[in-house]
Amino acid sequence: MSPPVLILVSRPVVGMSDGRTDGDDGFRLADAGAPQLSVFDLGVTRGDGVFETVLVEGGRATDVDAHLARFARSAHQVDLPEPDHTVWRDAVAAAVAAHPPVGSLSVKLVLTRGIEGTGVPTGWVTAREAPDFAALRVEGVRAIVLDRGYRHDAPATSPWLLLGAKTLSYQVNAAALREAARRGAEEVVFTSSDGFVLEAPTSSVLIREGGHISTPSAELGIVPGTTQRRAFEFFRDEGFETEAVRLRTSSLLRADAIWLVSSVRQAVPVTALDGEPLTVDAPLTARLNRFLSGR
């Protein structure tokens, strides 16, 4: 596997100046094998930051502008300054160009609040060869349903919970996946404490009932999915009705199929939920993944 590429973003937010001179793009290539981040950075000490992950296939980055828009929304939610769209877009392109050609790349953008007390944000982009998820897209995953511990209206009643922001604080998601492993599964579908479907730890949830494809509405405090949006384009082209709605947990039991979709893994079918087998539409899943891959 090729070594990763690291781009340090010196001007990560709008209005930030670092003594720019002609030819300064606001970022630079750095040694990914050398220390670069202060142990006092709030992204390290408190998980205080946001991120995005972009899939690159055949040298082509997927939905960069949609990812950057979500990056900006997440930054706004956690009261970080607005990311400089142009600098980050160019930094992504530079990371892709600097990496040796491979089939798929996972490009990660990170913005933190920076070293405590400085008020200067930290930003970087990494590009590394993506794992091969081809088999997973065919074989699928077993999932369990877990209560996330808050009501469906928590985003409105408790905005300080930062629900829907793609933050660096992933300990709850990691703990949920460990719980899934203890129960003989690989994935989790989160639900609200009052019985609404939310999302998976790193994926959006798609549910098929007959000719209808649905996903939980972003108003429930979930991360709005860029891959989910593209999957809806595919399903509409296939003749399905699509809708983002409030889904009761009971809809999981009625589903003709369930997928977990994300930027790098793409569409992964759920083969069992809480130990109960689910139908997998292999031909439809294969066509969906070809669409998401741009093939």
Image: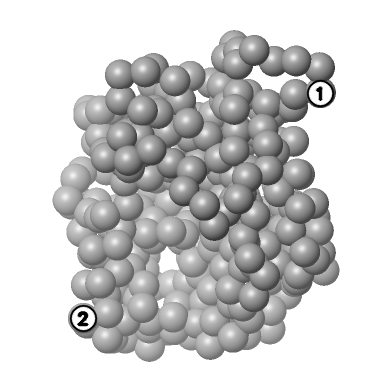
Q: Which residue is mark 2?
A: 182
The answer to whether residue 149 is left or right of residue 55 is left
Residue 62, position as x, y percentages in the image: 72, 52
Residue at point 57%, 54% (across, down): 32
Seen in the picture, residue 9 relative to 171 is either above or below; the reply is above
x then y, percent, for residue 200: 39, 61
Q: Are marks 2 and 1 in contact (CB under 8 Å)?
A: no
Q: Nearer the viewer, residue 163 or 46?
A: 46
Q: Residue at x 71, y 48 (%)?
A: 95
Which residue lies at the image location 25% right of the left edge and 34% below the top edge?
161
Of 237 and 57, the residue lying toward us: 57
Q: Amino acid at mark 2?
A: Arg
Q: Crowding at label 1, few (<14), some or many (≥20) Cα neighbours within 10 Å?
A: few
In 3D space, how far apart are the residues under numbered discs 2 and 1 (Cα atoms)? Answer: 53 Å
Q: Which mark is residue 23?
A: 1
Quadrant (top left/top right/bottom left/bottom right) for the N terminus: bottom right
Res 114 label: none
> Which residue is nearer to you in this view: 192 or 175?
175
Q: Quadrant of residue 167?
A: top left
Q: Secondary structure at mark 1?
A: loop
Quadrant the C terminus occupies:
bottom right
